[in-house]
Amino acid sequence: MASALRLFASLLLVLVFAGPGLAQTVNVYTAWPESLSQPIFKAYTAKTGVQINFIRLSTGELVARATAEKNNPRADVIWGAPGDGFAAAKEAGIIEPYKTANIDKIPAELRDKDGYYTAVSKNTLIFMSNAKLLKEKGLKAPTSWNDLLDPAFKGQIQTADARTSGTALTRILSIYYAFGKDEEKAIDYQKKLHKNVQVYTKSGGGCTVPASLGQTTVCIAHMPDAMEAKKKGYDVVVSFPKEGVAAVIEGVALVKGAKNREAAVKFIEWTFSKEMQDLLDKNNVYMLPTLPGASIDADVQALMKEAKLLPVDLEWVGKNRKRLVDRWINEVIRD
Amino acid sequence: MNRQAVRDPVILPTAMVVWAAVFLFVLYPLGRLLILVFWNEGPSLDAVRGLVGDWTHRAALVNSLVLAALVGVAGTVLGFAFALLALRGGLPKWLGRAVDAVVLLPLISPPFTAAIALIFALGPRGLISYHVFGLTNVSIYGLSGTFLSETLTYFPIAYLTLKAVIANIDPNLEDSAFSLGARRWRVFRTVTVPLAIPGIANAFLLVSAASLADFATPLILAGTKFPVLPTQAFLQITGLYDMRGGAALCFLLLVPALAIFVGQRRWIERRGGSYVTVTGKLGAVTRIKSLSPIAITGLGVLCGAVALLVLVCYTLIAAASLVKGLGADNRLSFVHYAHVFSGGLKAVRDTLIIAVLCMPVGGLFAVVLGFLVARTEFPGRRALEFAAMMNYALPGTIVGIAYLVAFNDPPLVLTGTAFILVVCYVFRYSLAGTRATTAVLAQIDPSLEEASASLGARRDVTFRRVVLPLVRPALLAGMTVLFIRAMTAISATIFLVSLSWSLVTVRILEGITNLELGQASAFSMLVIALVYLAVVLASLAMRKLNAGSLGQAGSLLGG
């Protein structure tokens, strides 16, 4: 709290001395949809007067773009993208370590051990099913990974393609951890699951619309995708596999050679304030806050009671991600 | 052909300026990208090594070629059927126009729109597949869906190309065959088709090339079972964070793409010599009777079914833009349009500004390049023509990344400006204008220019006062195509939009990935309306220039 106060004071000082005439800006690349990111950025501008310019890109496009711009970075901060994107960004040498003042409060599994990136929020995998189709087929919403192997679900499952989507990586990790970190068992299971999959979508949330409209029964996606669909009025059921799902991070990092470094750092600091962390709930982002004690949506809380979250070893993922994806391409989807 | 020699005082400097532009905006970015891919503290093939072992990449190359061939054949057949029906079917004028307007829709709408519309119509629980025919286990993903969607999207290229060709076949030739006692089928087989063959080959190559470069349709419809090359390259870059590998895949795609373009250009050149269409000797036009009523009925059913399918698809898009949430809350609502005209207005304005800026710049570039290629002789003329079409032949993703790599740091910093978007479009989509210019010039006797020269006019005066007025239709066609492309293209520009300049197509893609289908549909409808407006204005202007119908402008969309 003290550090938050100190931060607030220093922000005030900056405001007083910089004055509104010298409009400061921070350039942000984000993978979050505008509907989720913009209200948060606007809140920051309202509070500090610092303008947040942002471009929304898919995670892969974001990393490709920042890599191509390496010699003359256009972004100051990468804010709101899945952890594997940051692992790639770290490897490509486009971000630099920055440890927030609040670092001690943030659990170790939610940040890079070298401080290159830190979680803004925590995201979980869910099963989202079309209620009407379940009823038509006389099925219950799946509550185990093995439920998805039921022949009744043949051609009725959509989920993300591991070559384009961080969500797919969450799924692969979830299965890996759910099967007791036995990689062979996990691959074997995925081969069976593959037989029931109708199509692998480009984006993580790509199956949300089809499941909402009844083009497919089950969509394996992230929590926000399903909650958004619910909010829009589609009749969908959210469920979790009892074996558990991986909790993955949505991170933030400072771009190496950022032109507005000072302003960028302040924005990152604000990310870990209770004020911003509470906004995740207030703005219906439907992700879990990183900072312990920040508020959580009642619906999400109720749902999370059913969920078994399996902690993810970020370092292991960083080292093994490519192999897992390669095996998915060369063994799972090859038939 | 009579060509102007190098010693002409205007040709060489002009050629040098064009060469410099092509070097700077085509060869330089590709060169920077090649270095990025194949240079890792010394020449290196690391980027390629990882790709060879991956079965999806090998399958992708084969699949791309198979798909391009299939779409080429189906698109050409369908295009031929439509052209025959339009010209020989005796349809009422209004019906012909209505059919034209409908079948053009997929070609001029933003990418992804056609594929998404097809899922709405024919996917699982689609309007046609489920609600009309009651099918529950339809598979639209894979080869079949991609093939269908691409055929529907690109056959209008064949249709418009073939329409122009068949329209130019003198009906009196068919008449002569009839009067010699030939039956209808024999006339069709031995007169009509052979005369249309160069057009058919051209149409096939144009449609195949469009399919080969398409990455949006397979991205939505191909799934994992049917990988194709442009999509693989995109996935390699954005999914596996492997820019070098993805770029290497794109260079692989360059081989068949350029082969098609070289082949197609040869057809055009050959046609230029022996298929002179303006002879001034056309006899009295007789009533055309080469199609039997049964054949016309058959064609009518086929074409009607296709047009109906397209109409249903786009009605669904229109419906999605007008209700709260298609399938969940089907109440009429204008919220999506309200969003387009409030939050989305900046993107619309930016896109329009850029599209309008592209027109004069790209139009002039296309005409000058076309003139240089068709009428003059200077060192490196062929190479220039080849270099100028490279940005078109390469998948957009790679052109976008090459631009980003090349123009983000000195000597030339352009990222973040509108200029980089304009330049990207101009050097990617001027090919249509260039082609139109060479085609028009092939029909005009060089003696016209010689007359001007012998009267003492300087080369630039001749160009301005004689050539330019003659190629006005080509200029107009080129500018229209540029406008349409600037309004609808996405693959290259997704990497070039900036904090200050955004584009409508990027918003559409965002809407599709974020479950905002209503918004994406509303943006798409707006783009379609603007493009139609441009096409109508262009065809009115064409008519004023006395330069044939809209068909010619449209046929250039693909090439």
Image (spheres, coloured by chain):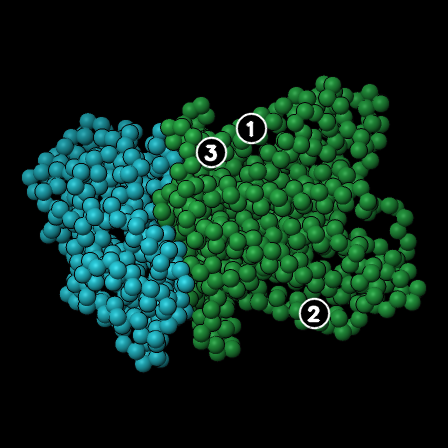
Whether pointer 2 and pointer 3 mark residues with C-beta atoms closer than 8 Å, the reply is no
- Screen quadrant of the N terminus of chain B: top right
- Residue B300 marker: 2
N-terminal of the pair, mark 1 or mark 3, is 1
Can residue B514 be seen in this snapshot? no
Label 1 is placed on what type of residue? Phe
* Residue A56 in the image: above or below residue A129: above
- Name the spot of residue A94 as percent of width and height, x first: 30, 35
Nearest the viewer among B518 and A286 is A286
The residue most toward the right is B180
Could you tell me which residue is drawn at 53 percent across and 53 percent down? B62
* Residue B520 in the image: above or below residue A134: above
- Name the spot of residue B432 as percent of width and height, x first: 64, 42
Measured in 3D between alpha carbons, the distance from the residue under mark 2 to the one under mark 1, in whole angstroms, is 49 Å
Label 2 is placed on what type of residue? Gly
Name the secondary structure under disc 2. Answer: helix
What residue is pinned by disc 1?
B23
The disc numbered 1 marks a residue on which chain? B
Q: Is residue B277 left or right of residue B353?
A: right
| Mark in front: 2 vs 1 | 1
The residue most toward the left is A2
What's the colour of chain B in the image?
green
Measured in 3D between alpha carbons, the distance from the residue under mark 1 to the one under mark 3, in whole angstroms, is 15 Å
Within 10 Å of the Cα at label 1, are there few (<14), some (14-19), or many (20+) other Cα atoms? Answer: some
- Residue B34 marker: 3
N-terminal of the pair, mark 2 or mark 3, is 3
* Residue B178 in the image: above or below residue B386: below
